[in-house]
Image (tube, helix red, strand yellow):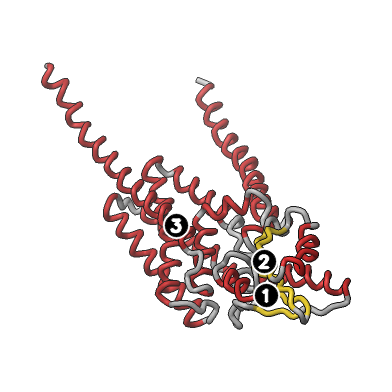
Amino acid sequence: MSTAPAASTRAPARRVLAVVVLVPVLAALALWAFAWPAARTAPRDLPIGVAGPAAATAQLDERLRQREGAFEIHHYDDEAAARAAIEDRTVYGAVVVTARGPELLTASAASPVAAQLLQQAVAERAAAEGTEVRTVDVVAAPAKDPRGAALNASVLPLALAGIAAGSVVTLLGLRGLRAAMALAGAAALVGMVAVALAHSWLGVLTGDWWAEAATLGLSTLAVSAAVAGCAALIGPAGLGLMAFTVMFLGNPFSGAASAPQMLPEPAGVIGQWLPPGAGTTLLRSVSFFDGAAATGPALTLTWWAALGLGAVLLGDAMKARGKGADPAAEREPALAG
């Protein structure tokens, strides 16, 4: 008779212990995920170009390679080829050797942090040699967002919108085709509202309005479909699993504040496999570079959305099959009797 009260008192104690242990663990994970990439931001095989005759660029090439592992150097014949590579998002910038002296081409729209890093690196070398470097911003960031702060700030709200949409669809009990339609409709509206704010009102996006809306909508759908699909297959735990993946990995590993090549390995690579990183890269391409290098991130987002919606439909089919099998199981004992 004394075992029941003891058991009832142990249950709340275990819950308190779980909370006391779980909260610090989550705090440690959050600090690791957000602080580690920020504290270790540095160029790691950052693609840059060197343009000019081979004899003239040999010394420059050697000096850049002294920073082992920092730069991935691409060689171009002249300034026009280097500009084309920047506009195609092949490199983040280029140093052109001319008769007047070195000239630095940057693209602050691709990454203000990378552009500033290149300016500092080249300026230091030029100061040591007693020369001046002329800097040209080939693809400049918008005048209303020169540091890319607005673009970086948009990653978290869009991730939250996707998590919220997937969670609401799951908690409301929507399944199958209705759930897929609700997710697609919500993502489309989020994309249009986000572009109305960022493009039409704030002026921090400068590309095609509908292409930007499609990008933001697809980014939201990739997250919301993954959340709802995971929950449809494994239950409520799927909500927490995907929320953790998007918030603690996708958001800090997206490279929105700098560039994927400036995050510690393998954070930059992982971030581009997840919706926030792929969405940020795609948004830069369609908004500032006329869609250059958009295929990869667009396919990544499409796969996330397709697999998530497929999981939603599969989960509904599995539940329907399970319910259909129950009446047959109940009739068997009656027929045997």
In what element is the residue under mark 1? Answer: strand
The three-letter amino acid code for the residue at tag 2 is: Gly
Q: Quadrant of residue 121?
A: bottom right
Q: Residue furthest top?
A: 337
Q: Which residue is mark 3?
A: 301
Tag of residue 105: 1
Compared with 74, 228 (above or below) is above
**Mark 2 → mark 1, Cα distance in angstroms:** 9 Å
Residue 144, position as x, y percentages in the image? 60, 82
In what element is the residue under mark 2? Answer: strand
Work out whether residue 50 or residue 296 is closer to the camera in this orientation and state it: 50
Q: Badge 1: few (under 14), some or many (20 or more) residues near its Cα, within 10 Å?
A: many
Q: Badge 3: few (under 14), some or many (20 or more) residues near its Cα, within 10 Å?
A: many
Residue 274, position as x, y percentages in the image? 51, 53
**Horizontal relation, residue 293 to residue 140: left or right:** left
Tag of residue 253: none
Tag of residue 49: 2
**Mark 2 → mark 3, Cα distance in angstroms:** 29 Å
The three-letter amino acid code for the residue at tag 3 is: Leu
Chain-order first, disc 2 or disc 3: 2
Q: What residue sits 22% from the left and 31% below the top?
A: 326
Work out whether residue 123 or residue 156 is closer to the camera in this orientation and state it: 123
